[in-house]
Amino acid sequence: QVQLVESGGGLVQAGGSLRLSCAASGSIFGPNEMGWYRQAPGKQRELVATITNGGSTNYADSVKGRFTISRDKAKNTAQLQMNSLKPEDTAVYYCKSRIFLTMRDYWGQGTQVTVSS
């Protein structure tokens, strides 16, 4: 089992920045990936960014150049630095961990990000 706890959400004005953090605990083994997804009201959950334990990253086109994902393997944490925020970035942001050997996904409880215009 893997437990994920997100923090760092909040309310910010357009153009501002926020930094989300995800702390993972439990059985994280072998090749794995941590990522951030978001879900706005009335919309499907969508990928924001992912990073593997090898450091490979993937970003949604809508956040490229504005968001940066990073992770500290020793501490089992992942961060999402969000700059130049837009009202359309408003959503609940979820942290996800995927263990590739089992292809099992674990999710955090989510943290609200609200960007005012």
Image (tube, grey):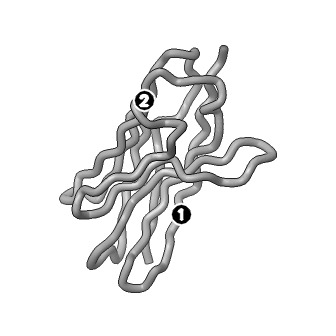
Residue labelled with disc 2: 66
- Residue lying at the far front in this picture: please name it: 61
In terms of sequence position, does the residue under pointer 2 or pointer 1 come before the other?
2
- The percent position of residue 54, horizontal first and vertical second, equals 22, 63
Q: CA distance from mark 2 to mark 1?
A: 24 Å
Q: Is residue 111 left or right of residue 83?
A: right
Under circle 2, the secondary element is: loop
For image coordinates 29% across by 78% down, the residue present is 29
Q: Is residue 65 left or right of residue 14?
A: left
For disc 2, the neighbor class at 10 Å (few under 14, some 14 to 19, many from 20) is few
For image coordinates 33% across by 52% down, the residue present is 57
For disc 1, the neighbor class at 10 Å (few under 14, some 14 to 19, many from 20) is many
- The percent position of residue 19, horizontal first and vertical second, equals 41, 33
Image quadrant containing the N terminus: bottom left
Q: Is residue 112 left or right of residue 41?
A: left
Q: Is residue 92 left or right of residue 78?
A: right
Image quadrant containing the C terminus: top right
For image coordinates 58% across by 23% down, the residue present is 86
- The percent position of residue 107, horizontal first and vertical second, equals 53, 63
Instruction: Name the residue nearer the viewer: 60 or 53.
Output: 60
- The numbered mark at residue 76 is none
Q: Amino acid at mark 2?
A: Arg
Residue labelled with disc 1: 107
Front label number (2 vs 1) = 2
Q: Is residue 41 above or below residue 57?
A: above
Q: Is residue 25 above or below residue 47?
A: below
Contact? badges 2 and 1 (CB < 8 Å): no
Q: Amino acid at mark 1?
A: Trp
Res. 111 image quadrant: top right
Res. 97 image quadrant: bottom left
